[in-house]
Image (tube, grey):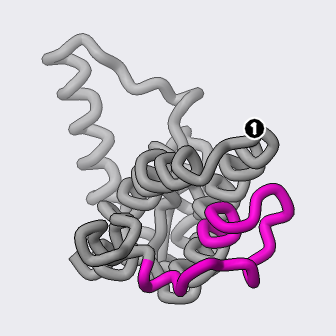
Amino acid sequence: MVNHDPLRGYWRLFKEFAAISGLHISLEKSTLYLASISYSFRDAILATFPFGYGSLSVCYLGLPLLTKRMSLADCLLLIEKIRSRISSWKHHFLFYAGRLQLLSSVISSLINFWISAFRLPSACIKEIEKICSAFLWSVPDLNTRKAKITWSEVFRPKKKGGLGLKSIVEANKV
């Protein structure tokens, strides 16, 4: 037998909120996400309450909602976004300084958004750095072996002979 008392408490909260604010929950737009419960308990909840059932992986504000530590597979969305952006730029005949500026502003902003919520796995960071290096040094064919300097040199300040990009590894630690 399933104890519905805690769930009925939530339902009561929704109704009290609606009475006070005038805002009602939209059952057609609501989805219930459950983790770490038995199938019988899940089925009992869904039979009792009029919500749709959803399963992870779900994106919210462009970020995946996860119940575990982030893996490389979870980062594929970020990697594909970066590839997509770079693919759209590689035929624009950008000079080296333009490519550097796009990496410094657009790609760094994408990465920083993800890093603000997650700690990226090192395999994800390596893949991102490989894509960025290929874009910086070998447009339009995106060959990773045509680098003029090592990628670690790119992160050094301009005063010390680097290109002034921010290190993804360091940002990930912060």
Residue of label 1: 92
Q: Secondary structure at mark 1?
A: loop
Residue 143 in the figure: left or right of residue 107: right
Q: Where residue 108 sits in the image (x, y, percent)?
A: 43, 56
32 or 132: nearer the viewer: 132
Confirm whether residue 148 shows in the render. Answer: yes
Residue 8 in the figure: left or right of residue 90: left
58 or 54: nearer the viewer: 58
Q: Where residue 84 sits in the image (x, y, percent)?
A: 72, 50
As drawn, which residue projects farthest toward the top?
22
Instruction: Report if residue 149 lies within the magenta region.
Output: yes
Q: Residue at 53% x, 86% y: name it.
A: 150
Q: Which residues are magenta?
A: 131-153
54 or 47: nearer the viewer: 54
102 or 37: nearer the viewer: 102
Q: Residue at 85% x, 63% y: name it.
A: 141
Q: Residue at 79% x, 66% y: name it.
A: 142
Q: Quadrant of the C terminus?
A: bottom left
Q: Is residue 60 above or below residue 43?
A: above
